[in-house]
Amino acid sequence: MTENDRYTPPKIWTWDTENGGHFARINRPVAGATHDKTLPLGKHPLQLYSLGTPNGVKITIMLEELLALGHSGAEYDAWLIDILQGEQFSSGFVEINPNSKIPALLDCSTEPPTRVFESGSILLYLAEKFDAFLPTAHHSRTETLNWLFWHMGATADLGGGFGHFYAYAPEKWRYPIDRYAMEVKRQLDVLDRNLAGREFIAGDTYTIADIGIYPWYGELALGRLYDAGEFLSVHEYRNVVRWAEAIDARAPVRRGRMVNRLRGEPSEQLRERHDASDFELRTQDKQPPE
Ligand SMILES: N[C@@H](CCC(=O)N[C@@H](CS)C(=O)NCC(=O)O)C(=O)O
């Protein structure tokens, strides 16, 4: 039995900065800025401050999808916020997102500029601003929002629960891994049953519900998240795999996955994006030298 199995909570919790784990260095029990630093501003209407995690990627996919549809107002600068270096606690970032989490968006095309935080809120904001990826008919719009809000709650169990205890905690503890593996498999089954009768999450059109859910459950079903594909037997969720493969094949999705990414092959990483041609430079990186 380890020390952790025997933990008896004290009467009053106090902050132990040495509690270990992947995020121990940046996690704090208080909000607000830790240092003064203004955020950089680029030339485009939309300024995105983010990182290529599932929550960040859903926004870059949305922006690339909007640009692919011809919405030039969706041109954006994507600035890298390195959360392991605590950059989400700068005074500039906190002004845009008081919750100090990526992604955060500043829409400079409005007067005054509009700040948008929480990835679900950003997806909805962009969908409404450009009238895209959100059906207008009441019934299908509501179904899209059902799944958009579902994923904002559910992914906390996948990332903050399962992913944290399976991949990032300082030790492997059976109780939390069992609890969250069970919940994540149940959620995969919810999606699988839903996708048995429809092509996309909310029906027969591709919406912000697909864009929000794909970087989490789609990447999980493709075996790319937390190296947990075999552990969770993701191949059993055939409808989710079919749906994830279809979304994965979209060119804007491939571009969106590259932005602000710090992991993987160098040719798949575009640390910052300020122009559509930035992707072409990355593609050239893949060519063998002449
Ligand atoms: N509910 C938020 C969650 C965002 C979130 O958890 N972001 C993580 C990266 S994926 C983060 O910024 N973590 C930094 C920290 O916890 O200090 C959203 O969907 O925008």
Image (tube, grey):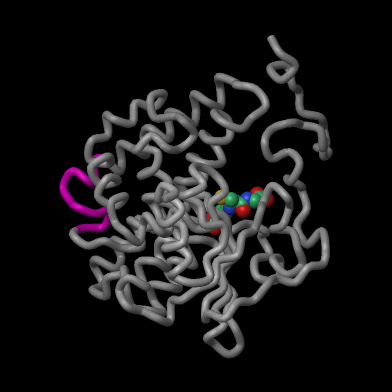
Whether residue 146 is visible, yes or no, is no
Please tell me which residue is depicted at 50% across the width and 42% down the height of the picture.
Answer: 264
Placement of 7 over or under 49, stated as above or below: above
Which of the pair 51/163 is nearer the observer?
A: 51
The quarter of the picture where the N terminus appears is top right
Q: Residue furthest left?
A: 197
Q: Position of residue 84 (x, y in %)?
A: 69, 47
Does 60 lie within the magenta span? Answer: no
Q: Position of residue 65 (x, y in %)?
A: 35, 67
Which of the pair 269/109 is nearer the observer?
A: 269
Q: Which residues are magenta?
A: 192-203
Q: Residue furthest top?
A: 1
As drawn, is 147 to the left or to the right of 271? left
Q: Position of residue 159 (x, y in %)?
A: 52, 41
Does 194 lie within the magenta span? Answer: yes
Placement of 117 over or under 258, stated as above or below: below
Placement of 82 over or under 98, stated as above or below: above
Q: Quadrant of residue 242?
A: top left
Q: Quadrant of residue 94?
A: bottom right
Which of the pair 284/206 is nearer the observer?
A: 284
Whether residue 14 is visible, yes or no, is yes
Please tell me which residue is depicted at 54% across the width and 62% down the height of the picture.
Answer: 118
Q: Position of residue 259 (x, y in %)?
A: 50, 58
Please tell me which residue is depicted at 35% across the width and 62% down the height of the picture.
Answer: 208
Please tell me which residue is depicted at 30% across the width and 43% down the height of the picture.
Answer: 191
